[in-house]
Image (cartoon, rainbow, N blue to C red):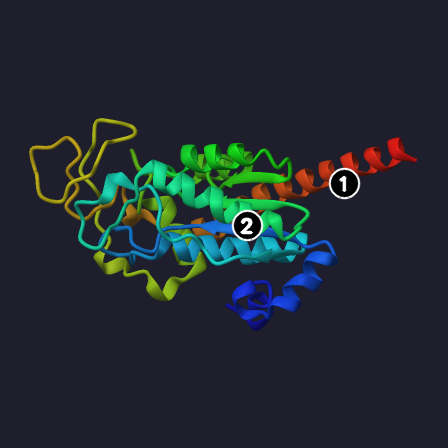
Amino acid sequence: MSVEAERSFVEHMSWDEVARRIAAGAAAILPVGAAAKQHGLHLPLGTDRIQAEFLASKLAARIDALVWPALTYGHYPAFVEYAGSISLSAATFEAAVAEIASGIVSHGCRALFVLDTGISTRAAAGRALARLQAGNTLHLTIHDGPRYRHAAAGFARQAHGSHADELETSLMLAIAPEIVEMSRAEASPPIAQAAPGCLTPSDETSPNYSRSGSFGDPTLATLEKGEALLAAMLDDIAVQATAFLAGLSGTAGEARGAAS
């Protein structure tokens, strides 16, 4: 991460620097990405955290935002049979998101974006923000935007997948190629369900068996795919965040006009 990017991360700043940035109108980003979640044989357990912090730094540069430390434990029940993987209950994760988000909002940031790299975390994170009823929070998910979906549909050659697969591995080749061990990439067997239950590395009779932990075919990943997917993903979240901020500014302007 560049020195310039680090200056958006509050962990590298003093409290009065943070206060000045907030007073000047900076928004806030809370990245959500696991640091203890298996990602096949070819990617580290911290893959989601790396993605979350990278995306947060790029988004912060586009919209003028401060980035809080990533929430690296979450609700990831599908992976707990793989060594090192940790999952919180949905209720515990929801409570953590709600408390952290409430704390960030209380400092006066004009908006808070919860940048969520997970799939099983989405429902609980959404509930957490709904509980705040703050009006200036937005849950950003990274795989749902139209640009990313269009790019993924055009590039994907795997028959199935959604985890440590062709697309995610391509993204990591674009974000942090030095940590991707393509020589260890291994496709999962054909899994009947489009969204399997808990994966298992040991029960070969299970419909969710994956020796490597991948769900999909990471051997098909390339840097070129990753660069295109990453650009689409960044554009999607930036467009959402920019539109949300514009809406807040419009609402504030209307309120001032009504009061005058």
Asked where in the image residue 21 lies, by quadrant, the reply is bottom right
Say if residue 222 shows up in the picture: no
Position of 178 relative to 32 (above/below): below
**Where does label 1 land, which residue?**
249
Residue type of the residue flagged with mark 1: Ser
Image spot of residue 177 (x, y percent): 38, 62
**Where does label 2 land, which residue?**
103
Category of crowding for the residue at label 1, using alpha-carbon neighbours closer than 10 angstroms: few (below 14), some (14–19), many (at least 20): few
What's the residue at 71%, 63% (across, down)?
20
Q: Left or right? Give the position of 134 relative to 194.
A: right
What's the residue at 17%, 42% (across, down)?
210
Residue type of the residue flagged with mark 2: Gly
Category of crowding for the residue at label 2, using alpha-carbon neighbours closer than 10 angstroms: few (below 14), some (14–19), many (at least 20): few
Position of 190 relative to 13 (above/below): above
Name the front one of labels 1 and 2: 2
Q: Secondary structure at mark 1?
A: helix
**Quadrant of the snapshot with the C terminus:** top right
Position of 87 relative to 58 (above/below): above
What's the residue at 13%, 44% (across, down)?
201
Image spot of residue 259 (x, y percent): 88, 34
What's the residue at 55%, 38% (across, down)?
147
Label located before the other in sequence (1 or 2): 2
Image spot of residue 136 (x, y percent): 64, 39
- The reply to whether dot 1 and dot 2 touch (C-beta < 8 Å) is no
Q: Left or right? Give the position of 199 relative to 39.
A: left
Which of 160 and 125 lies nearest the eye of the viewer? 125
Q: Left or right? Give the position of 219 relative to 69.
A: left
Say if residue 182 shows up in the picture: yes
Q: Secondary structure at mark 2?
A: helix
Asked where in the image residue 236 lies, by quadrant, the reply is top right
